[in-house]
Image (tube, rainbow, N blue to C red):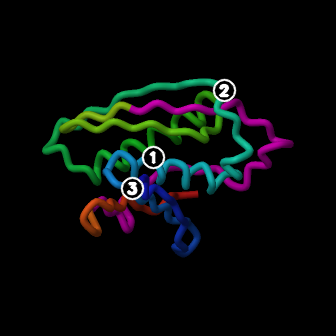
Amino acid sequence: MSRGRWEHFEHKADIGVRGFGATPAEAFAQAALALTAVVTDPSSVVPREKVEFDLDRDDDGDLELLFVDFLNAIVYEMAVRKMLYSRFEVRIEAQKLHAVLWGEPVDRERHQPAVEVKGATYTELEVSEIRPGEWLAQCVLDV
């Protein structure tokens, strides 16, 4: 059974996101859902359109750096495509990440976006196995 869940945490003028899951990939996906929840209620976003992207770290495959890259890639996709996402599928193998996002164009009346996320930061950045079979992925978002 999935242990996936997400939450926000306070950080001065910005906001932190946390994702929990049975694997790093699931924790990343839950943190991505928390990112959407900073902007709007994720349940209001219909997963109509699919967007895919790949990331590849040239360095030692640090999961924390890959996590920031992942969230920033979502922020980029949100801004360029003017979309919000409510469903995330993540696959991580070695230094490579493959993501599939499902969402829809922003509807200002229905989604009522609260803030614009500028990007993920290294502040309070952590990706770790906090208990056997439970991973945490977290950082602070610049809003």
Q: CA distance from mark 1 to mark 3?
A: 8 Å
Q: Is residue 115 magenta?
A: yes
Identity of the residue drawn at 64% across and 50% down: 116
Which quarter of the picture shows residue 3? Answer: bottom left
Q: Position of residue 99 (x, y in %)?
A: 41, 33
Whether residue 3 is situated above or below residue 110 in the rendered picture: below
| Residue on which the image places disc 1 | 29
Q: For mark 3, give the secondary structure.
A: strand
| Residue occupying image coordinates x 37% and y 49% | 68
Of the numbered discs in the image, which one, if any, rests on residue 51?
none
Residue type at mark 3 is Gly
Q: Earlier in the sequence, mark 3 or mark 2?
A: 3
Q: Please name the residue that numbered disc 2 is placed on.
A: 48
Query: Considering only vertical position in the picture, is 115 above or below 124?
Result: above
The alpha-carbon separation of the residues under discs 3 and 2 comes to 25 Å
Q: Quadrant of the C terminus?
A: bottom right
Camera-side mark, 3 or 2: 3
Which amino acid does the dot numbered 1 rest on? Ala
Question: Would residue 35 be counted in the magenta stretch?
Answer: no
Q: Which residue is mark 3?
A: 21
Q: Is residue 33 left or right of residue 26?
A: right
Q: Are marks 1 and 2 in contact (CB under 8 Å)?
A: no
Bounds of the magenta span? 99-128
Q: Is residue 61 left or right of residue 10?
A: left
